[in-house]
Image (tube, rainbow, N blue to C red):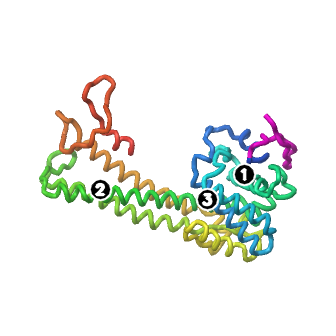
């Protein structure tokens, strides 16, 4: 394998010549062979990192801190990564030490080397364009990484909300379809009082609707970012106008209504938004699981179970019992 020689504060290392990542990423791959699952499994995270590098380059160019030629190359490279290119170059393990520095440096090195390539320079020509000095200008892992996680979370949550709305609509349609079908309501799985099957299905729609609202509320918390905080929130090594500009650029690039935290030191150490979002996601999961268990129970049988509803047969359910069909969709959701 052909290689190129790169240098960091620990010394020199040979990096595969065709790789867009560099020496810091290489060391991280060697240090953290934990799950064999690279960060590229989360394309939203990679796109978010690229969005930040793009917004930072625009801001630094506007402030006169970054040469326009270098900024334009970084921006072009970041746009390619946002579009899904070079995803295979994000190779550090999802489990790592160093508070995300390896992830940030993986992004810095990939974008730097692609930018060098766009400028007609060889990969690793960091005297001309450097991962730290130029791609990471005015930044620290401590503001880049949590902001990238928040941007990625926002994108994923909004897709979840759309999917829940689609499922809610399906339950609402079934509620109307089944509104005249009388059945027995149960408590403790014992016969209680009559109800309609439509009433039963309406509850699933209402539960989903409530959680759509809770998710929309929780996701607003991840819109508060700490870009411009740099290392610990004091903004060291960043221009006084950088935080405002990079936030504006991120809104333009992503379409996500991000705002700069009022206290960057507090925001850099506070994980409350992630805790809140985790709690709401757990709420969603518990309710979906309850619904799935109901559907499995109501469709049990078909000969010696409740057999009150029929779920669509999706696949053969057994390798030994002919004709057996299992409720595989509720199971996989669980």
Residue 6's x, y, as percent? 84, 46
Q: Residue at x 76, y 56 (%)?
A: 118
Per the image, label 3 sits on a secondary structure element best described as helix
Residue 59 in the image: state x and y as whole percent.
72, 71
Magenta run includes residue 138: no
Ranked by sequence position, the earlier of labels 2 and 3 is 3
Q: How many marks?
A: 3
Whole-number angstrom distance, CA of label 3 to CA of label 1: 14 Å
Judged from this view, the residue extending furthest toward the top is 320
CB-based contact (under 8 Å), mark 1 and mark 2: no
From the viewer's perspective, tell me whether residue 174 is left or right of residue 74.
left
Taking depth in this image into account, of 17 and 151 the one nearest to the observer is 17
Tell me which segment is drawn in magenta: 1-19
Nearest the eye: 167 or 69: 69
The numbered mark at residue 187 is none
According to the image, label 3 marks what residue? 48
Q: Position of residue 323 (x, y in %)?
A: 25, 29
Side of 12 relative to 228 (left or right) = right
Horizontal side of 124 relative to 50 (left or right) equals right
Quadrant assignment, res 1:
top right
Cβ atoms at labels 3 and 1 below 8 Å apart = no
Q: Which residue is mark 2?
A: 170
Give the secondary structure at mark 1: helix
Disc 2 versus disc 3: distance between alpha carbons? 32 Å
The residue drawn where x is 44% and y is 57% is: 160
Toward the front, the furthest residue is 120
Q: For mark 1, what is the residue?
A: 110
């Amino acid at each position: 394998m052909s290689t190129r020689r790169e240098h960091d504060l620990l010394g020199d290392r040979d990096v595969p010549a065709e790789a867009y990542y560099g020496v810091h990423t290489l060391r991280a791959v060697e240090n953290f062979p934990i799950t064999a699952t690279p960060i590229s499994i989360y394309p939203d995270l990679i796109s978010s990192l690229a969005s930040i590098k793009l917004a930072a380059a625009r801001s630094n160019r506007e402030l006169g801190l970054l040469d326009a030629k270098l900024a334009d190359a970084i921006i072009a490279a970041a746009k390619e990564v946002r579009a899904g290119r070079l995803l295979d170059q994000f190779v550090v393990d999802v489990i790592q030490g160093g508070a995300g520095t390896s992830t940030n440096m993986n992004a810095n090195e990939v974008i730097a080397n692609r930018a060098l390539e766009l400028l007609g320079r060889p990969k690793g020509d960091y005297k001309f364009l450097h991962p730290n000095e130029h791609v990471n200008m005015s930044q620290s892992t401590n503001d880049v990484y949590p902001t990238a996680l928040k941007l990625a979370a926002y994108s994923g949550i909004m897709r979840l909300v759309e999917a829940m709305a689609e499922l809610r609509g399906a339950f609402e349609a079934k509620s109307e379809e089944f509104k005249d079908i009388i059945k027995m309501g149960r408590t403790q799985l014992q016969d209680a009082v009559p109800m309609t099957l439509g009433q039963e299905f309406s509850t699933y729609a209402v539960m989903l609707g409530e959680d759509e609202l809770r998710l929309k509320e929780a996701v607003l918390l991840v819109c508060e970012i700490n870009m411009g905080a740099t290392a610990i929130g004091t903004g060291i090594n960043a221009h006084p106008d950088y935080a405002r500009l990079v936030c504006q650029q991120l809104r333009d690039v992503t379409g996500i209504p991000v705002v700069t935290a009022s206290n960057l030191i507090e925001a850099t150490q506070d994980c409350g938004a992630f805790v809140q979002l985790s709690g709401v996601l757990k709420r969603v999961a518990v309710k979906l699981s309850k619904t799935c268990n109901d559907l499995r129970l109501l469709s049990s049988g078909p000969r010696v179970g409740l057999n009150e509803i029929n779920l669509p047969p999706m696949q053969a359910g057994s390798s030994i019992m002919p004709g057996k069909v299992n409720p595989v969709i509720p199971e996989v959701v669980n």
